[in-house]
């Protein structure tokens, strides 16, 4: 059964920052630009902090999913399954393309 599927945006002017560790354990800051729940799993779309253009648009973003570690703490991880990634990316792409017209000249 699928949860109610509603892409969540962040209110204009409000920025939520997420700090992640890269492969060399360096802290990298990202802006949370959306969230989505599918089949009980939470997914997040993020862009590098400060990379949005002056209108709040962006060209690329990453998608991570929330999982619980052995201690029950939330971790954000890559989506390993290609079909799962394509399904979730499609939802975010549709939501973001409706919000930002990337083809406008």
Image: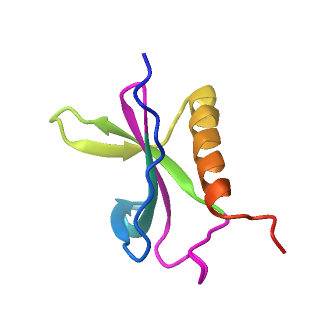
Residue 77 inside the magenta-drawn segment: no
Q: Residue furthest top?
A: 1
Residue at figure coordinates x 46%, y 54% from the top left: 34
How many circles with numbers are drawn on the protein?
0
Q: Give 69 or 13, whichever is nearer the viewer.
A: 13
Residue at 60% from the left image edge and 79% from the top image edge: 55
The one of 49 and 94 positioned closer to us in this rendering = 94
- Residue stretch in magenta: 37-59
Q: Looking at the image, which residue is at 44% across and 72% down? A: 12
- Looking at the rendered image, the quarter that the N terminus falls into is top left
Q: How is the image coloured?
A: rainbow
Give the residue at the far bottom of this rendering: 54
Residue 85 against residue 3 in the figure, above or below: below
As rendered, which of 5 and 42 lies closer to the eye?
5
Q: Is residue 7 above or below residue 58?
A: above
Task: Name the outermost residue toward the right.
Answer: 105
Residue at 61%, 79% (x, y): give it: 53
Q: Position of residue 10 (x, y in %)?
A: 41, 62
Give the percent coordinates (x, y) of residue 74: 25, 43
Residue 67: image location, x then y, percent: 32, 36
Q: Where, quadrant-wise, is the C terminus in this rendering?
A: bottom right
Quarter of the view holding residue 36: top left
**Most distant residue in the left direction:** 71
> Residue 80, percent across and down?
53, 33
**For residue 93, above or below residue 90:** below
């Amino acid at each position: 059964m699928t949860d109610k599927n509603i892409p969540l945006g962040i209110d204009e002017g409000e920025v939520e920052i997420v700090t992640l560790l890269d492969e060399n354990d360096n802290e990298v800051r990202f802006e949370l630009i959306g969230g989505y729940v599918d089949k009980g799993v939470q997914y997040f779309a993020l862009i590098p902090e400060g990379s949005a253009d002056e209108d709040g648009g962006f060209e690329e973003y990453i998608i991570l999913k929330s999982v619980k570690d052995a201690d029950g703490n939330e971790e954000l991880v890559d989506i390993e399954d290609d079909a799962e990634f394509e399904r979730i990316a499609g939802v975010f792409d549709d939501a973001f393309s409706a919000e930002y017209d990337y083809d406008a000249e």
